[in-house]
Amino acid sequence: MKHERDNASGPRERGRKGHGQGGGRRGRRAFDNGTLRLLILQMIGDRPRHGYEIMDEMEARTAGAYRPSPGVLYPNLSSLEEDGLIACEAADGRRKLCSITPLGQEHLKLNAAKLEARGTKPECGGRRFRREAPPEIADAMDRLKSALRGRFLGRAPGPEAIATAAAAIRAAAETIDALETSPSALPAKDADMTQIITRHRHELRRRELTVREITDITPNMRRIVLDGAELDGFSSLGFDDHIKLFFETGGEKPEMRDYTPRAHDGGTLTLDFAIHEAGPATAWAQGAAVGDTLRIGGPRGSQVIAPVFDWYLLVGDETALPAIGRRVEELPEGVTVVTLAAVTGAAEEQAWQSAATQETHWVHRADAADPAPVLEALEALDLPEGKGFIWIAAEAGVARALKIHMLQDRGHPGEWLKASGYWTKGQADAADKSLG
């Protein structure tokens, strides 16, 4: 979350090594080129696909006997597109997503007998996978299937739950696609940031909501719960999403401030306001009463971290506490979350409930723009074993100093760290959400 301070793509498509030039496995093609074109078209007719998905599906349909190389697949895709049977468009800036055209559908119908005679219906590779996959991978797959059955079978999940689950699965798939799986491979330290964080766009709407409940959770942190019919369709997938709050202050345009959705359950939206030097948001929160209205916009988008980490380190000041609290509460059992938060004193400390294992650290400081107290505490932290993601949000100078320490002094992979300046000392409503 950014409280106001008025003074203050996916992995590259590739074939597997050792498969030969254009021959797939075992150095030969399993299909003549005409049949291969039809089979590729059939797969795209089932649903739009990226090139690497077609290679994976081909391998699954032949029970591992054949996987076309990029040198075979992509000329066929180009030929199908030139013939007007498919249309391919860049879906994420790097990879093209191919969809069948009406002409392609007619072509499939005309050649259905040929496909049937060739016996190209999908074969199940599940048994082979269970037999050959590492036990840890098979167990993880079973855990995922169990979680999906428990959450979505025989139930009516809301759109936010569906979107969150789908985003997590897609993010995991992209991370796995990027792995180097040879025995000598190093951990995926050099994975591209786009494989760790997936970005989601939302419909940009303005909403007018009504204050339902007001609670002071600490002397200087006020929680306001909002509801209203216009909340319908609101989506926030990332714990550090931000929305715009609009305040009429007598100027030509309303003043705007960024805030993190502390919680959203479909019927209500919760915001936490750090009470400090009065700006328009602080003044509104201090004077708010049940029944008052507030106009909001967004969030424009969400950034979702792939659920592939053993531990998380969350560092920030009061302005980051709503995002930190939300993240801690959302993390599942089996991971560790370490929090390091800087506040003015013990009265401003908060407690969070979580299925994850928590390690909570507080720093009491006077100047929120002085990195020294937080940096000293960070240097003293012993981080857990395994792969960890670090999230930092504070005054821009403080966040930058903490980021430099973790990257340069501790050697943490840059792809596994996100730092933001939620406010800048001496500048009203100034932020740097992606620090250099």
Image (cartoon, rainbow, N blue to C red):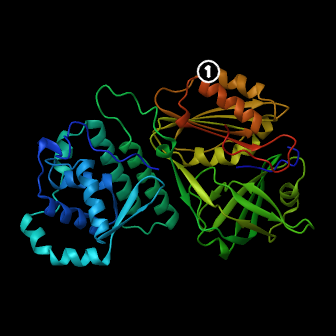
Numbered disc total: 1
Secondary structure found at label 1: helix
Report the residue that reaches farthest toward the right.
Answer: 250
Neighbour tally class for label 1: few under 14, some 14-19, many 20 plus, Cα within 10 Å? few
Going by the picture, which residue comes out furthest to the left?
Answer: 117
Between residue 72 and residue 240, name the one nearer to us: 72
Residue lying at 76% horizontally and 34% vertically, measured from the top left: 397
Q: Using residue 13 as the reference point, say whether residue 167 is left or right of it.
A: right
Q: Residue at x 68, y 46 (%)?
A: 433
Horizontal and vertical percent position of residue 399: 71, 35
**Percent of width and height locating residue 168:** 45, 52
The answer to whether residue 143 is left or right of residue 93 is left
| Residue 147 image offset from top left, x and y in percent | 38, 53
Which one is nearer the viewer's eye here, 379 or 251? 251
Q: Position of residue 15 (x, y in %)?
A: 28, 44
Report the amino acid beneath label 1: Asp
- The relative height of residue 194 versus residue 231 in the rendered view (above or below) is above
Q: Is residue 19 above or below residue 2?
A: above
Residue beneath disc 1: 409
Which of these two is toward me, 163 or 343? 163
Say whether residue 306 is visible. no
Is the C terminus in the top left, top right, bottom left or bottom right quadrant? top right
Residue 212 higher or lower than 332, as above or below: below
Res 105 seen here: yes
Residue located 42% across and 33% down the image: 188
